[in-house]
Amino acid sequence: MKIAIGNDHSAVELKNIIVDFLKEKGIEVLNLGTDSSESCDYPVYGEKVGRAVVSGEADLGIAICGTGLGISLAANKVKGVRACVCSEPYTAVMSRRHNDANVLCFGARVVGSELAKMIVDEWINAEFEGGRHQRRVDMIMAIEEKD
């Protein structure tokens, strides 16, 4: 498995912790985020992660900013992305099982490193259930075609 990870200046430290956590699990990581604490624009990194996932360069993506919200909005503008903001493990699991989320977002100013690891672990280990949920995912994706 290969995971693209992106972040803005507020999340450099947490990104590095998550990168190490993923590598310890034998997961390949594509670092698309900043490594600088200089102020930068989270939409750049949300888009990079989204494009890496949609292109197949990565299997899944993780995007981290201060709250997770702004970077998720940017990632979700990439056609084919289903980015979710998760501040606890249950929502992370359900985002995969029911929504087939392909980008996980969270906030470095919202969750601590241990909780972030739990969220990531639950998210990457959950699988899409398909069935009745596939119809709903298809409906979500069809919205992109309307614009």
Image (cartoon, rainbow, N blue to C red):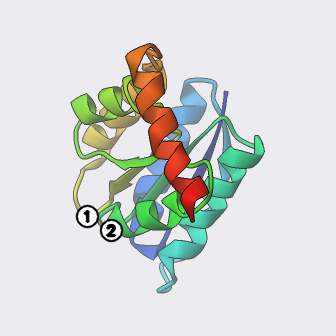
Of 134 and 44, nearer the camera is: 134
Query: Cβ–Cβ below 8 Å for labels 2 and 1?
Result: yes
* Residue 129 percent location from the top left of the image: 43, 15
Of 126 and 25, nearer the camera is: 126
Q: Quadrant of the N terminus?
A: top right
Residue 34 visible somewhere in the drawing = no
Q: Say which element carries label 1.
A: loop
* Residue 63 percent location from the top left of the image: 48, 55
> Which residue is pictured at 50% across the width and 58% down the height?
76
Left or right side of 23 for 94: left
Q: Name the disc covering residue 109, or none.
A: 1
Q: Name the disc covering residue 66, or none.
A: 2
Q: Residues within 10 Å of mark 1 (few under 14, many from 20)?
A: some
Q: Name the disc covering residue 58, or none.
A: none
Left or right side of 18 for 61: right
- The amino acid on which the numbered mark 1 sits, given as a three-letter code, is Arg
How far apart are labels 2 and 1 at the CA level? 5 Å
- The amino acid on which the numbered mark 2 sits, given as a three-letter code, is Gly
> Which residue is pictured at 49% across the width and 74% down the height?
42
Of 58 and 145, nearer the camera is: 145
Residue 147 visible somewhere in the drawing = yes
Quadrant housing residue 60: top right
Q: Say which element carries label 2.
A: loop
Note whether 10 is above or below 14 in the view shown: below
* Residue 111 percent location from the top left of the image: 24, 51
Residue furthest to the front: 146
Q: Earlier in the sequence, mark 2 or mark 1?
A: 2
